[in-house]
Every structure is written in structure tokens, then in C-alpha cells.
Amino acid sequence: MTQNKIKLSIVISTKDRSQILTRCLDSLVDQTKNMKDVEVIIINNNSSDGTVKLTHRYIGKFTNWRLVTETQLGLSYARNRGWKESRGIYVAYIDDDAIAKNDWVSQIITFINSSPEIGIFGGPYTSYTISPKASWLPKEYGTHSLGNKTREVHIGKEWINGTNMVFKKKLLKKFGGFDTGLGMKGKKISYGEEANLLLRMYLAGVPVYYCPKIKVKHLIPDYKNNLIWQLKNQFAIGYSWYPTHIKKANFPVSIYTLLRSIKNTFSYLVDSTRIPLKRRVYLSLSGLIQEIGVFTWHLSSVFNKSTPENEK
């Protein structure tokens, strides 16, 4: 297949999650097996489990599927390798723990054909679980929707999500792809690479669109039912906030927002008595832990001169 014959490259980055990956790959088989203008690229990010053996079962059946190994650890490295290896005009990203709706590919192609001027777009996701979701998590946890209408997204106030997003490859090349100083690295929790890229493109005048018909389901794994993990997660979100949003450090503002978060946390714990205790603890502490993450980033940048911006 040559590049000018391929319209869409689907990229799945994965590391040591072969059992979960199977669900994602199975959801793409019937959608892509007879499509000559679509390719599927699985990026193996140094897996040590059965990922390679698993993916070869698919690659052996379909000529438009292939496996690429990225040895540099990190989701951003893997996603960048994906678009660099791609031969399509557009690159679609789906997470290895997501399940594409049975018309996901056709809806993407339909949107591309109807709106060729749009270079970035994405859709909603709902959740699925293996074990029941913890009752103290908010009802909407694990879902993302911007409504039922196709429209432009005001990046900075709202976002499309990395488990269901599509780019023109030329834009990924122009902007250098994902910031490798941000994003998950093995078991290290880190975020921001998706939002950072979208924000850089949006600030440069590239519109971003939301299409509600492009749907996936995203896994809420068992470990996310743990309150301690959730609070660590909020810390990681806070720690990456400034480099994600391309903001200059503002230490006085950080101190002020941290103190305000402490006040709000105590107020919430006292006033929200109708909410179950564990959910109240989760909701009240989430904002505070995020601000502690932001504050820690400031301390790191001031005293160690080491932030996610220069860890590239």
C-alpha cells in the first residue's frame, strides 16, 4: 500500500496489557479487514508480556495491520512513533483499553469526506468495567461528552480526549506531535500530552471539532476503584498543569489557590452531609490534591530547576 491510497491510519499504543488489548483489536477487525484505504498500526512500547504474540495473530490475517516496536518508554513516544510510521492522510488514536463502536471507522471516514477542511476532531466515550465501578465515584466518572451536535471545540475551556481523536498527519508533523516530557511513562502517572498538543494547535489558529457519532467505550480498570490511587492521580494532574497549559510559573497565585483549596475542602466536608462519606472525601480532596501537585511543581522548578518542560 502506498501513502496516496491510504486515507486513515489507526494507531493503538500499548504496553504489557495484552488481555485488555484483545478487546480493542477485536472491535476493529470487522471494520477494517476489507478496507484498502485504512491501516491499523499497533505500537508496542517495550511490552514484556504476550503482546507481540497476540498482535501477530491479527497481523497474520490482515495485510493492512502491522506491529511497530518503540523502545523509548512513554505514551508520547509511542504516539509520535505511530504518526511517523503512518501512511494515511489522517491519523486516528484509540487507547488499548478502549472498544470502538462497530461503526467507529465508517463514521470517521464519513466526517472526513463531509468536512475535508477540518484537521482535528474527536468524539465522546462512555465507560465499561470488568468489576463494578466503586459506588463512591461520581456517576459521570469515566465518560466524556460535549453534547449531541457536531461543533467546534473551544480548547482551553473544553477538550476532545486522547482515546478518541483524529488528526491530519501534516498537522502532527508541523507541530512536532506530542510533547515527550508529558504523558504516561510505564507505571509513572503523568498527563497533559494530549491537551498540550491541542492547545498549541488551537492557539496557532487550527480549529478543533467534536463529532458525537464517533464513539468508543473506555475501560475503568479495577485499580481506579481505589481512593489512594485516585488521589495520586489528582496530584499528577496538578503537577503537569503548567507545562500542559503552556503557562509561566506564578508562585504567588499557586500559594493563593492552594490556601483557597484547603478552605474549600473543609467547607465541603462540613456542608455536603447528604453525599456518602467516601464520595465526599473523594470530591473534597480532589481539588486540594491537584493544587498540592501544582505547588510541588513550583517547588521543583524553583529549587531543582527540573520540571516536565525540560525532561525531554
Image (cartoon, rainbow, N blue to C red):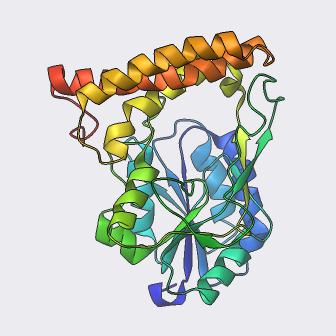
Relative depth, front residue between 60 and 83: 83
In this view of the protein, which residue sits in the foreground, 262 or 38? 262
- Using the image as rendered, state which of residue 288 and residue 123 is in the foreground: 288
Q: Is residue 132 visible?
A: yes
**Which residue shows up at 51% across the image and 40% down it?**
47
x then y, percent, for residue 170: 37, 77
Report the residue at 71% width, 76% height from top.
107
Total numbered labels placed on residues in the image: 0
Image vertical order of residue 5 relative to residue 190, above or below: below
Pinpoint residue 273: horizontal percent, then vertical percent. 76, 13
Residues 174 and 77: in front is 174
Q: Residue 229: tell me if it is visible.
A: no
Q: Is residue 26 left or right of residue 193?
A: right
Q: Is residue 228 left or right of residue 307?
A: right
User: Which quadrant of the figure contains the C terminus?
Assistant: top left
67 horizontally vs 19: left or right: left
Residue 12 occupies which quadrant of the picture?
Answer: bottom right
Q: Where is residue 69? Give x, y as percent.
A: 44, 53
Residue name at image x 45 percent, y 46 percent = 75
- Residue 215 at x, y percent in the picture: 73, 62
Q: Residue at x 50, y 53 (%)?
A: 157
